[in-house]
Each structure stands twice: as structure tokens, then as C-alpha cells.
Amino acid sequence: MKRLLPLSLAALGSLLYADMSTQEFLYKDSRIMGMGAANTAVGGYSTAVFYNPAGLIKIKKEHGFEVEILGLNITGSENVKSFADDLDNADTDQETIDVVKQHAGEVYNINISNYTSVSYHTEGDLALSIGLLAASDVNLFPHAYSGANGLLEVHARTYGGIVLGAAQKYNNVIGGDLTVGLGVKYITQKSYEAGLDEGEVTAHNDDLDTYMQDTYEVSNSGIGVDVGILYEPYILDGWNPAIGLSVMNIGGLDFDDVYGAQPMTVNVGVSVSPEVPFLNSFTVAVDYVDITNAQQARVRNYNPYRAEDQYDSVDITNDSMQHLRAGVSMGIFDNSWVTTTLNAGLYQGAYTAGLDLQLTLLKLQIATYQEQLGAEVGQIEDRRYMVGLGLGW
């Protein structure tokens, strides 16, 4: 029976996967995530280049240059601090193992990112943007025993690069305004992926980051192209409807099939922005992202007789709700001194909420959303909270 156990675990390993964070978009803007991440037919920010580059045309002309010299986002899972504190308070190897097992079945994410950008909407119908992205993303998945995926599963990466975007509007095209957008980005990344056993967890509790770098680091780089359109038909007077379509990550961001690879996704969205009394702006949007189901899951090919880890990407069919994004944005104030926007939405079947506050040069955003990490909604859920800090004008 004991001789059969390793073979049973190997077979089980082919059934277990870790979809630790959906990769259809390279960057999550807290302002957009609070609105359910529905931005394909909305735009309005420099970060539209990560959703639909045509959305750059929605940057307000009266703002002139939009400069964000600091666009820092910090994201953490609901109970990640509790997990970190418990590990920090563990004094012995056995206590460390017990802490990991106590948190088995939970998932934890920490993400720190910064997007610094300069955008400009000309007096005509052209919008341009250039930005620098730097991000670090860590996902931890504790297990109850050192089985097919180890005692502590780690999926992490650091990445960044330069992002360029442009959008050109053409008036009176088939009864509406048509904007065509183009984005180009060069991204480098270092990824780290492993199912750590009990010995690795206890031996490297204090220097896990160094151990992962020395043992599991993989470096990659690539160029991705994004194209998109935004169509605003001359119908429903006063509602300002828009239809968006984007094809993201065309080209070489597959990173040789390691964690963090960016699949090419096709996304569609619709929005309306009616004039509402007492509000500066009001927008309702619905997106369906990754129409072709290009998002993949990570599977560890477990072999008890092989020391190194080997993860591969496999095709999965996600619950359709995981493709759905919907949100509403309400602008309360918008003047030279203060801008306040309240956001709410639905992301992968769970609620989102957010606040965007700008005071002259200081920007503060807070948001919450829930990532669905299994093949179906509700299978593995990770409620995350975001805080964004920025300096710009």
C-alpha cells in the first residue's frame, strides 16, 4: 500500500491546479476595480491602455496633460496579515508547520504596483500616453499536508516595463463616432513558482524570498500589442451609449509558459453615461472579458522522485460568471480643487466598491473586489482590498 501512495499522489497532482490570479489584464487600477473592472467601453484614465487603448480618448480635454508621477497601488487579501503574524510568532519548526496547516484552504495575495504616466488629449481628436510600470505579485496557498502541491504553494512574480498608447477618433462613421486605439508594451519579468514541502518551509521561514530567488527564479521578457475600438452611436439622446472591443496582449507575452504569462484576450463591453441631476457624472458599464477563454490554469506535474517543480499551463473552461464585469461610477465633485467619485460593481460574481478622491495634487483611491481562483464561482474565493496613492495633476 505504501508503494502505491506516491503513484496515487502523482495522479492526484494532475487534477489539482492553481489559478492564483487571472492574467487577462496586466495591471489592475483601483479606480477601475471598484467599478467591477468594467472599462472596455469606458476609459477616461491613462490606465485605459491595460483594458482598451481606445479609452484614452475619454481623458478630458479640459484637464490638458494628465500626469501621474506616482500611481502606487497596494493590494492584500482579507486575512493575509493574520497569516503573516502567525508565521512570525511561530518559534519552532513544528509550530511553523502547524500554522501553515491551520490556514490550509485559504489563499493569500500581496500585490504592490506603481504606474507612472503622462497622457495628453489634444485639442483635436487624438490622445497619447506613455507610462512606466513596476509591480510585484505574491500568491500563497497553504495545504494541510505535503502532498501533490506541497505544504505551501507559492506563485509570485516581479515585472515591469514601458507602455505606449494612442487613440484617434473619427466623427460621423456609420451614424456615430469611432475611436481606434493602439497600445504597445515591453515587459520583463522574474517569476517564482513552487510547491514547498515541510523541510523547505521550516528551513526558510525567515528568508523565503531569498530562497525562492536562488532556487526557482525564471527570467523572461516580451513585447505585446493591444488594439481596440470604441464606438459611440448617435442614438439614445442624453444617454451617451458606447460599445467597446479590445484584443489585448497580441504577440510575445507568453513568457515560455511560466507563471505570469499573458494570454491574448478578446473583450467586449457596453456603457451608458446619462446626465443625472446633482451628479457631475454617471456611468453604467458591462463587460464580458476573455471571450475565447484563453485564460489558463497552472498545474504542477508532481513526481515524488524528482526534486524540482514543474508547472504547466492548461486550458480550462471557467464559469461564465468569471468573465462578467459590471459597474457604476458616480462623480460627486469635479473642479480644480477636488474630484470625488464613488464606484460599485460586480466582478466574477461578487460585489466591488471603491472611492476615488483627488485633492489638487494628491490622489487617494480605495477599493475591494473578490478574485475567483477555481474553475467555478465559489470554489476558491479571495476577497482583496486595494489602496491607491498618487501624485499628479
Image (cartoon, rainbow, N blue to C red):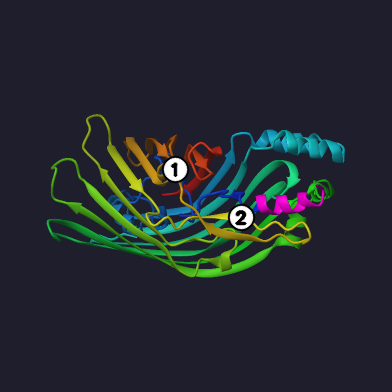
First in sequence: mark 2 vs mark 1: 1
As drawn, the label of residue 33 is: 1
Pointer 2 residue: 299
- Going by the numbered disc 1, the residue's amino acid type is Met
Q: CA distance from mark 2 to mark 1?
A: 27 Å
How packed mark 2 is, by other alpha carbons closer than 10 Å (few <14, some 14-19, many 20 or more), is some
Which residue of the protein is positioned furthest toward the top in this rendering? Answer: 278
Mark yes or no: residue 17 visible.
yes
Q: Nearer the viewer, residue 95 or 59?
A: 95
Total numbered labels: 2
Q: Position of residue 261 (x, y in %)?
A: 54, 61
Q: Bin the neighbour count of mark 1 within 10 Å (Cα to Cα): few under 14, some 14-19, many 20 and up.
A: many
Determine whether, in the image, residue 261 is placed left or right of residue 1: left
Pick the front one: 248 or 126: 248
Q: Nearer the viewer, residue 266 or 204?
A: 266
Image coordinates for residue 64, horizontal then vertical, percent = 32, 55
User: In terms of secondary structure, where does tag 1 sit?
Assistant: helix
Q: For residue 385, what is the image quadrant?
A: top right
Tell me if 301 is positioned left or right of 304 in this view: left
